[in-house]
Image: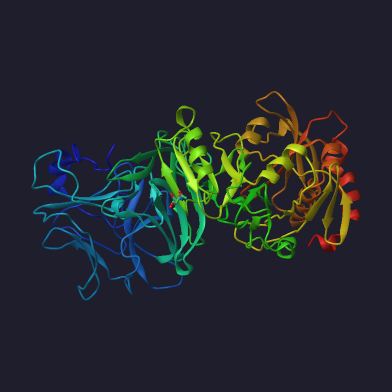
Amino acid sequence: MGLELKRGHFQMMVKITFSIFIIIPKIGLSFAADFLGMNGSISHGETLVSSDQIFELGFFTLGNFNMSYLGIWYKFSPDTIVWVANRNNPLADHKGVLTFNNAGNLVILNRLNGVVWSSKSSRILQNPIAQLLDSGNLVLWDDFVLSSDETYSWQSFDYPSDTLLAGMKLLLNPKTGLERCLTAWKSMDDPSTGDYVHRLNYNQGLPQFETVQLNVHRKTFRTGQWNGVQFVGIPNLSSPAGVPLFVQSETEISFMFEVHNKQLFSRIKLNSLGVLQLLVNRSRTATLNVKLEFPSDPCDFYGRCGANAICRCSLCECVKGFMPKSPDKWAVGDFSSGCHRTIPTNCSKGEGFWKIKVVKLPDLLEVTLDRRMNLKECKDVCSKNCSCVAYANSDVRGGGSGCLMWFGDLIDMKALEGWNRVQSLYVRLSASELDATRDHTGRNIILVAAILSSIIGGLLFVGATRWSIKHKKRRIRIGGLEITKEDIDLPLYDLATIKSATSNFSIGNMIGLGGFGAVYKGNLSTGQLVAVKRQSKSSMQGLEEFKNEVLLIAQLQHRNLVGLLGCCIEGEERILLYEYMENKSLNYLIFGKTISFFNSLLNNDILS
Ligand SMILES: *[C@@H]1O[C@H](CO)[C@@H](O)[C@H](O)[C@H]1NC(C)=O
């Protein structure tokens, strides 16, 4: 399963054509070789093209600068640069040349013959060949060495820029510390090393991917740890656009993906804003599909709800038994202070654990892992150690195994949904808290609702602080207003589920159209009929409405009235799912009569 691609039959072909080897400039006949032989060179305007015309290698310039770089791009989409050789050492003019040095390494020379960049061949090559493969890999090998299972002495796939192509590996060697990660460009037109990296973290022997903003030493996103089947916090990535392969051994932990459909050209890119994107081009066109982005949901932002809080459908809520450290800040949408225990735990009698189902487990900051323990043993050990805050299985396979225990704050939890293998977290609670949950007697809960307007753009926060007074009679406080309402509990649906329920938002399924967007009739895989309200992407007004509506969801009476089932926030999509009620529900779904009633109740200035 290695990346050590074999040169095999290429060698034969090159031997035959070697003597007629020639490079034709780009402007000439559209024909270029896919390899460079010992005495060959490439200067500005000349390129190598992979044999199936998929990738192209050459010098390029960006933006308004005169700087030039050697890179690889899709032949069908020259703006899509997937690899840059001299990203931190650009040529100041268009006089660069790619050729070989005496040791057989590829070198980029500037106009004064100074070496700007060099490949790092593992050995000296007598008869070097550089070849651009259809995978986008630029490989170097020695035509003098005849053994056909000789591996490449250098390949560009070992030096990723900001893009992971199929067959390329992100990896970590726990023994040597060798690491291959994605490093973002500085900006869209500056390929030099930027602020963000996406890398494997291997804390406690459990791998997870993280995006880190290096200049401020801050994590911005993590996938959640590998649970034997998938990374817990992101959807299972398997699709025609890419089948992920994860390898874990003593000397290598690595991730790569393969594409089995020849019409799809997929790549994973860390853009200059630190957003990880799964991008797919179809059938050799520049038309691009962004399949997935991380972070995209507000709950993907690392540690958004602070310590000991769970992000659910854009709402931050303290874990049971915890309350906001500074309720005033929470009320205005500043969650960073997080939550602390309402009643301290001290290993006293009657303490137990509260189960949180289907959750992206907290970050592996202060944790221990014992793969041999089962859940029962894990509970016993955790309950005897007073500083153990929570525990969970580390692996979901075969009904679950392994013991993860947390000893500090629980950071970066997110409520997940059906697409995830169930992985529950058990949090220590005091005896009285446990009793309280059994009796349904009053306790302090403060929930804050917040919606993010765009991925990186301005944050539109809305705060809603609520207190429970006693059973069945609770007040919700939004700004200065108070309304008696019941519990917040809004399930999250993923876009794929909704798409399949509505035949990909087909016209045939559309049952209404309003200013905010469209309503579709959908059929969930459970057989339940739903009305899907999809906010149109264009209107800011729609976003505002959505914001209001989700705020209103905080009130169960309203939710029951319209039969709201859940929501979906993915990328730019803002979708609400309602029970499908023939005719009845349509009026307020489309014309928003109920909504405007509540809007007038909650006047707008406290919402913005
Ligand atoms: C609790 O667990 C931590 C981490 O394994 C350990 O360092 C500590 O000694 C344990 N405390 C007790 C009382 O066993």
Closest to the observer: 502 or 336?
Answer: 336
In the foreground, 446 or 34: 446
Q: Quadrant of the C terminus?
A: bottom right
Q: Looking at the image, which residue sits at the far top?
A: 527
In the image, residue 492 lies at what x, y percent? 67, 41
Q: Is residue 282 visible?
A: no
Task: Identify which residue is drawn at 39% across, 35% down.
Answer: 372
Q: Compare residues 390 and 106 and report the one nearer the observer.
A: 390
From the viewer's perspective, is 4 left or right of 267?
left
Q: Residue at x 50, y 33 (%)?
A: 376
302 vs 260, left or right, is: right
Q: Count all numbered tags in the image, as a single digit.
A: 0
Q: Residue at x 13, y 38 (%)?
A: 148
Place residue 507 in its image quadrant: top right
Looking at the picture, how far across and down is residue 522, in whole percent?
A: 72, 30
Image height check: is 112 above or below 559?
below
Q: Quadrant of the N terminus?
A: top left
> Residue 299: x and y, percent?
61, 51
Query: Would residue 606 be seen by someone viewing this image from the given angle?
Result: yes
Q: Give residue 413's position: percent from left, percent from top.
A: 58, 49
Q: Is residue 436 left or right of residue 294?
A: right
